[in-house]
Amino acid sequence: MDIKSKNINTIASPELKTNYKNFPMVPRVIFGAGCFGQLGEILLPRRINSEAPFIFLVDDVFEGSGLISRIPLIFNDQIIFISADEEPKTDQVDALVQKIKNDYDNLPSGIIGIGGGTLLDLAKAVAIMLTNKGNAFQYQGWDLVKKPSIYHVGIPTISGTGAEVSRTTVLLGPEKKLGINSDFTTFDQVLLDPDLTKGVSKEQWFYTGMDCFIHCIESLNGTFLNAFSQSYGEKALELCKEVYLDDLQEDDARNKLMMASWHGGMSIAYSQVGVAHAMSYGLSYLLGVRHGIGNCLVFQHLKEFYPEGVELFNEMKVKHNIRLPKGICAELTNDDFEIMINVALSLVPLWENALGKEWRTIITPEKLRSIYQKI
């Protein structure tokens, strides 16, 4: 990713050529309560032939539920249930790709992810790796994917991650937690049905929604901020405040949080996240802490960097009677802290967005350790 091209807010003089990043966007999106019922007619024109199935990667929490009977299976389509209890991994992607290649002689017509951020990220990664050689960990980074992915669709069943709109698929690899960031990662179609988010536990609703809130805070306070990311970030932040501080009707809250997630994801598409995300990656890599709660665990201690955001976060936490776990890092060894710190420090674009190009004069291993020790 060309970081310099994202931090230019003025028009260059004629003799100086400015290169702006030409980011992809989701070309097709449908929104509305009950729109999941249109999935069959959306997929039908995309079928290559009767021997090229659609593969549905579905959160196993829905196994045996009414949602499964609504999935428009025909020919040799297949549902693969996947647990979202852990963060998605590169070797998990490789195993899914190998299973699909073993099961079918030809490439599928497409991959459909149904679930939260874990399932959406897996769907994006599998779609990429079906057409690109090697292992998924080899593509963790920026713009390493060379061949277009197969057709893939994202259907979120919880709101906040922004995975439905982002150009990255965040994976735990053998050496790091990092996304496959590429122009081929973005979904070809997204289906946003607020009804699918019914039944989400209050804690998960809060943690995942705070992922969106923190996206906004980090984008709006970052050095990469521009009019594009600002317009989306401000709208997402406004919606988050309504959802978590006002007393909305449930249907209205579901609709607005789904839109907040979309806008928050769009904000960081042309910007970046910051301190909380960088440090939460360290927690996830070492301890397997889920992304949403990991962000919350870190963000509560970042008043030095995001004073107004942390104040709002604490207000939301109190209003919804959320009690974050304590002592997560209490038993860690020096080697453990070193691993987390190294993972966090490897995410250079996040630190540059948060603190500028001289971020290393502000953030040191000792500084990160002092924050981790509070968690």
Image: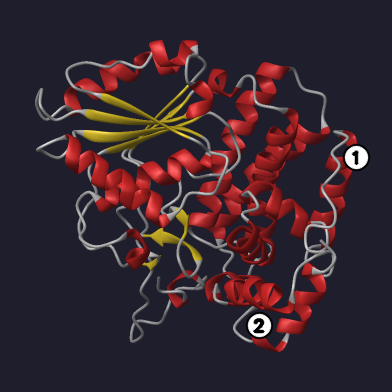
Quarter of the image with the C terminus is: bottom right
Position of residue 329 measured from the top left corner of the image (x, y, whole percent): 78, 63
Rendered image quadrant of residue 248: top right
* Distance between the alpha carbons at the discs numbered 1 and 2: 32 Å
Q: Name the residue under label 2.
A: 359
Position of residue 201 measured from the top left corner of the image (x, y, whole percent): 70, 27
Quarter of the image with the N terminus is: bottom left
Instruction: Write the residue at 10% across / 22% down.
Output: 50
Q: Name the residue under label 1.
A: 318
At mark 1, the secondary structure is helix
Label 2 packing within 10 angstroms: few (<14), some (14-19), many (20+): some
Question: Quick check: 58 left or right of 308?
Answer: left
Three-letter amino acid code at the position of disc 2:
Trp
Position of residue 257 measured from the top left corner of the image (x, y, whole percent): 64, 32
Rendered image quadrant of residue 72: top left
Question: Quick check: 303 left or right of 226?
Answer: right
Instruction: Write the residue at 27% across / 46% down.
Output: 97
- Residue 14, compared with residue 328, is above or below; it is below
